[in-house]
Amino acid sequence: MKFGYTLMCEQAGPPALVQDAVAAEAAGFDFAVISDHYFPWLEEQGHAPFAWSVLGAVAQATDALPLMTFVTCPIRRYHPALVAQMAATTALLAPGRFTLGVGAGENLNEHVVGGGWPPVDVRHDMLEEAVQIIRDLWRGEEISRHGQHFEVQNARLFDVPERPPPLAIAASGPASCRLAGAHGDALIAVEPNADLPAAFDSGGGNGKPRYGQQPMSYDPDRGAAVTRAHEQFRWFGSGWSVNAELPGPTAFDAASQFVRPEDVAESIPCGDDIDAVVAAARSWAEAGFTHLALLQIGGNQQRDYLWWAEKELLPELRAALS
């Protein structure tokens, strides 16, 4: 299993994210992923810079660290023709080390451009069409397309990498997993559920990478770790069918108002117990995932976490699961 670092735009500003990426590469992480949000999940997180500007800076500030969007939604806030251009440019700035991760998105981020929030089956149809547009444009040819959901008129990318970047697709259920298997180069999921890779395989994903993400709250003071996790991550347990629909941080605050600190601590490793993180990572490996992005909760808590990851956590994870 490969272990990645999460650049969580909802909890840190642009300069801090770039510095954290450099430190993550020095600490020995195998790759880094970045969230692409217009809003934080909760007001307490406090940030939401433009991920693609941060990616450009990170691409120049790092030397060999593989980078990935986790994930970009190409069906509402961004037109797929624009995503194709953003990804091609980033792939040129980080040759051979950029993967475009896409998904059907959340109302939280996409409602800002208006037009309503489509039901999930329509979003999946839109995503499938968007992926085809992106791949067509990566060939560097002029295309026009009059699809069910998107119009593309005489579009052409003048700067494209010699080899297109891999395209990973986020999924949370059987239908989206089959879509990812048929049209993606990798799977992205947020729960260690073995049914997801199985559905991915049934759609054509056999042998392709599978990415998961594991949040944690490292702190030598476990009480402080639990408090921080509850403050900033109590939204996490609602499930994707809920998380994709809520329209803003206020709604997530209301939806999670009865979540207790002990509830969060039961689902997210808190403190400095390496065995708890290894156990969580093992659940992903046993479910069939090949890559795991670790997410440290708290934008101001990255320096100590990165030291701990380099000296203690990553060696233990690799000994147990690599």
Image: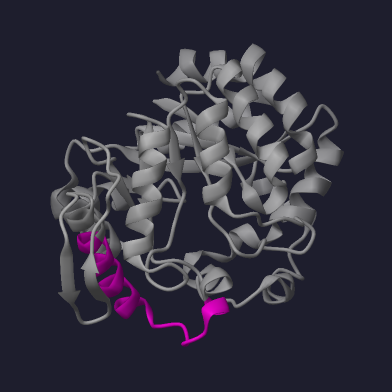
State whether residue 28 is above or below residue 178.
Answer: above
Magenta span: chief secondary structure = helix
Residue at 27%, 53% in the rendered image:
157
Residue 172 at least partly seen: no
Q: Which residues are magenta?
A: 111-133
Question: Residue 90, image x and y in percent?
Answer: 41, 42
Q: Residue furthest bottom?
A: 115
Above or below residue 264? Residue 243 is below
Q: How is the image coloured?
A: one colour
Q: Quadrant of the C terminus?
A: top left
| Residue 185: x %, y % from top left | 24, 44
Q: Nearer the viewer, residue 263 or 313?
A: 313
Q: Residue at x 48, y 12 (%)?
A: 319
- The image shows residue 130 at horizontal and vertical percentages of 27, 66
Task: Out of 193 and 201, give the one closest to the viewer.
Answer: 201
Taking 272 as reference, is 176 above or below it? below
Horizontal relation, residue 269 to residue 271: left or right: left
Vertical comparison of 272 with 267: above or below: above
- In-front residue for pair 250/280: 250
Say whether residue 30 is left or right of residue 276: left
Residue 137 in view in this figure:
yes
x%, y% of residue 200? 23, 51
Quarter of the picture holding the N terminus: top left
Residue 318 lies in the magenta-colored region: no
Q: Is 121 covered by the magenta stretch?
A: yes
Q: Residue at x 23, y 58 (%)?
A: 156
